[in-house]
Image (spheres, helix red, strand yellow):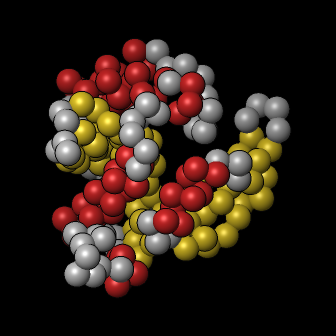
Amino acid sequence: MGQNCLRLMTAADLESVLALRNHAEIRRYMFTQHEISSEEHASWFDRASNNAGIELLVFEMDKQCGGFVQFKETNYHGVVDWGFYAAPDAAKGTGKKLGLAALAHAFKKENLYKVCGQALHWNQPSINLHKSLGFVQEGILRDQYFDGTDYHDLVCFGLLKREWLAKESPTGINK
């Protein structure tokens, strides 16, 4: 079994993260669905990595980029929004491993209070993953996202640190 780790994204990761982000299976679930150019991606990375309220992380599997996680501060102390994606060709269960690693990072290393997420109402894989990680569905923002043609609902999730910690057990689910 290979090694997995979550680490800060660097400029050396730009190409591999962009390849994941531009994959058709990832793009179809994103708010921005066009194919992103290298220049646009580099500009985003420069802005985000120079913003103290944003943390960009790469999920490595056997020293290969297996996914991406972003935490973004909200206006509320200890509360962040997250976004993530796993490599579409990765082994089944990679998304769950990425999510567990990211949440352990958020709650244990960063000592955050709450992680919030949103999914387009038709993004069943993300909805299922949030639920499997212990997130609570907190609401639906009706017709919140406009894709250029239609409006779509957003499903909102939240996970509190105390809920995350309560899931810890001798089996090591959140270790």
* Viewer-closest of 47 and 86: 86
Query: Residue 12 appears at what percent x and percent y?
Result: 20, 24
- Nearer to the camera, 110 or 120: 120
Give residue 168's position: percent from left, percent from top: 29, 79
Left or right, 170 with reference to 155: left
Residue 34, image quadrant: top right
Image quarter in which the C terminus is found: bottom left
* 161 in relation to 53, above or below: below
Picture quarter with the N terminus:
top left
Asked whether the viewer can see residue 2, the reply is: yes
Rendering coords of residue 18 (x, y %): 39, 24
Residue 158 lies left or right of residue 60; in this view the side is right
- Residue 75 appears in the rendering: no
Task: Please report the residue visible at 76 percent of the width from the left and 31 percent of the height from the top.
Answer: 148
Please state which of residues 33 and 85 is positioned toward the viewer in this rendering.
Answer: 85
Q: Is residue 4 left or right of residue 96?
A: left
Please, which residue is most extreme toward the front here?
1
Residue at the (22%, 81%) spot, across then down:
170
Q: Residue at x 32, y 24 (%)?
A: 16
Residue sitting farthest toward the right: 150
Depicted 101 relative to depicted 157: above or below = above
Q: Is 139 placed left or right of 20 in the picture?
A: right
Residue 134 pos. (x, y %): 46, 72
Q: What is the count of numbered marks?
A: 0
Residue in the image at 25% along x and 76% along y: 171
The quadrant holding residue 33 is top right
